[in-house]
Image (cartoon, grey):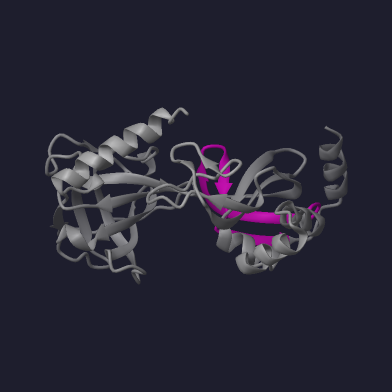
Amino acid sequence: YKVPLSEARRSVTNTYLDEAGLERDDLSGSGGSGNEEVEIADVDAPEEWVDVTAKVTELWEANSDAVAQVGLLGDETGTIKFTKWSKSDLPALEAGKVYHLRNVVTDEYEGRYSVKLNRTTVIEELDEDLEVGSDDVTVEGALVDIQSGSGLIKRCPEEDCTRVLQNGRCNEHGEVEGEFDLRIKGVLDNGDEVHEILFNEEATEDLTGITLEEAQEMAMDALDTSVVADEMRANLLGKYYRITGPTFRRYVLVDEVEERSEPTDAEAVLIKARSI
């Protein structure tokens, strides 16, 4: 039996952290020195230690005792989610204030990047304002394909891991029980441009009217999870949508969706796509 290298590396790292009484966020960083100062739009990889100057545009209610604050940071290039851990013992951030944050670590979940404030983070409030830009794009077209990996899926339940399971296995943690999730990986085609789009659980429920619980019931009744994606294809393919959201790799991540009247050639676009 062979343990994947990444799983073995994580196991060894966690063992050392436990013995030292440290958290993964404390493994790197040196109190804010030597990091690259980045704009929010330049955050494009997880587990990097960076410095950012940003405005707190939103504060949300934390859904865990482990989280002291959660919300949205913004600069001229866009916005990004931030999380400040309770154990970090850092001063509270205020909405509308601008801060220089040294030694934050980047993270990624469901295609969206975020930054985590940890016990080594240095927070400096700045007496200035900052104009916050948007990194959203808007695309539209007929939904011509709902790709494999859509519908009812299972994700790895391990902390800080959101990988989709393949045959009950996570590429990093091996065989795990998994937690159910909903998503749609779709393709929009307007005859001139093709865009791949990604709906998370909330956006999928809003679009389809199928909740996660209902999707699980459908799968249990049919003894087959694929019935959920099949139902989505039957109800959605061929409809014309306008999608707004940020981009991640080749996908547009759906924040807003509007069903629109089909242009005269929408059916032709769908027929063309099915013939490829």
From this viewpoint, is residue 100 visible? Answer: yes
Using the image as rendered, state which of residue 240 and residue 107 is in the foreground. 107
Please report the residue visible at 65 percent of the width from the left and 41 percent of the height from the top. Answer: 195
Spot occupied by residue 154 in the image (x, y as percentages of width and height): 57, 51
Quarter holding residue 240: bottom right
Q: Please say if 50 is above or below 60.
A: above
The boundaries of the magenta stretch are 237-259
Q: Is residue 128 magenta?
A: no
Q: Please say if 71 is above or below 186.
A: below
Please report the residue visible at 35 percent of the width from the left and 72 percent of the height from the top. Answer: 61
From this viewpoint, is residue 103 visible? Answer: no
Spot occupied by residue 236 in the image (x, y as percentages of width and height): 77, 57
**Residue 105 placement, left or right of 119:** right
Q: Please say if 53 is above or below 213.
A: above
Using the image as rendered, state which of residue 203 and residue 56 is in the foreground. 203
Quarter holding residue 65: bottom left
